[in-house]
Image (tube, rainbow, N blue to C red):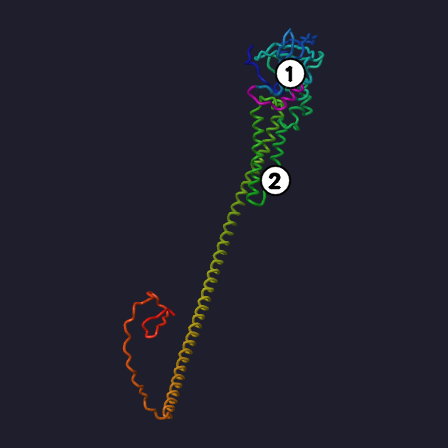
Amino acid sequence: MNHARFRRLTPASLLTVAVLTSTLTACNGSEPATESAVEYQPGTVVRVIDGDTLVINFDGYDQTVRLLNVDTPETKHPDNPVECLGPEATEKLESLTPPGTQVGLDFDVERTDKYDRVLAAVFLDDQTLVNAELARVGLGVPMLIEPNRKYYDEVQAAYAEASAQAIGLLDDSAACTVPAEVVDAMDALTAATEAPVGATGSAAAATAAGILAALTTAKAVRETLEAGKDTVRVIALGADRTAAYISDLDTQITKGEKSLTAANTKATSLKEAEKAAQAEAAKAEAAKAAEAKRLEAERVKAEAAQAARVEAERLEAEAAEAARIEAARVQAEADARAEADRLAAEAAAAEQERIRNLPPAPEPYIPPAAPYVPPAPPAAADPYPGYTGPRCYAPGGKTYRPC
């Protein structure tokens, strides 16, 4: 099987291929095939793998079946994360074909794909095409891998119903869908650009930061639309809706970039004005501090002068008092000496007067001469050696006893 001719197409492209195929058929002069009864291969559902793949038992053994002409978001890809609404698509397929469900299978030109999965349309009660039911609720998109287009038109018609109702992958209330991301991004950017810039540099900078964040998100969504053209959730939009979203985002992004420039300009201007005002305030504060310092110096100087003056006056008063006291002392001493001299003179005069009035002095008394007393004989040996107290001598004075 030549896989090089496999390609995934958007709904608009698929419609073009369908019309072209019809035209070529008409040009070749062949008549379109008439509907005929289809004999379905009976099978029993064993389990669901993901939104577009399940295991069915038929021809005597379990086989992995890939639904024809529909593609759902990935949930089991080894290299990719779970995609938007992938679990919901799996749940939808599980609700349609729970284990044990009897189904009918029909095949197209190629029986298997490059992963050796059986390519088939799966029917319930020979009427309900499971492939189309996934598209009808917007959880699967039409997919054409030539030459297998047998059920493409039916899947595309079912998806047109989902598109008209904006459900599933087109539901802007489901947070992970592209419409939801576009709406959220544009609403956020609109709110950011319409927010008041603010009267301070920090407020203007915050507004600019909000616009930048919203712009970044909007550009990321736009990049998703550009880079994710082969992903299910972008294919779900269709070419026209994708182009419209890109155009709306471009308009909003351009407006946002202008608002960001204006906010940044105002923020810069306000910050420069605030910086100048701060510098002026700092200058005024410095001048105020210098004046306060000068006044304080003058106060300290005045207090020092006052203290020096008071100290000088105190010392002068103390010196004057000391001089007064010394003069008083000297005067007192002089007065005392004068008084002493006066008293001495009076005493001398009185003594002279007393002497003048004394009677004549009697003859001086001459006492008789003392009789001779011979020296005492040498004392006997001291009967009390070492005694130094009072002594009582015996008559004659030769012996004594302690008194």
Pointer 1 or 2: first along the chain: 1
Amino acid at dot 2: Ala
Residue 154 pos. (x, y %)? 67, 16
State which region is magenta.
78-93
- Examine the rendered structure and indicate whether residue 336 appears above or below residue 77: below
The location of residue 280, given as percent across then percent down, is 50, 52
- Badge 1: few (under 14), some or many (20 or more) residues near its Cα, within 10 Å? many
Residue 333: x and y in percent read: 40, 80
Q: Quadrant of the C terminus?
A: bottom left
Please state if 164 lies on the left or on the right of 281 as rendered: right
The residue depicted at 58 percent of the width and 19 percent of the height is: 77
**Mark number for residue 195?**
2
Residue occupying image coordinates x 40% and y 85%: 343
Q: Is 126 left, or right, of 49 in this rendering?
A: right
Q: Is residue 191 above or below residue 110?
A: below
Number of marks present in the image shown: 2
Choose top left, top right, bottom left or bottom right for residue 45: top right
Indicate the secondary structure of the residue bearing disc 1.
Answer: strand
Left or right of 281: which side holds 327? left
Task: Work out whether residue 319 or residue 311 is closer to the camera in this orientation and state it.
Answer: 319
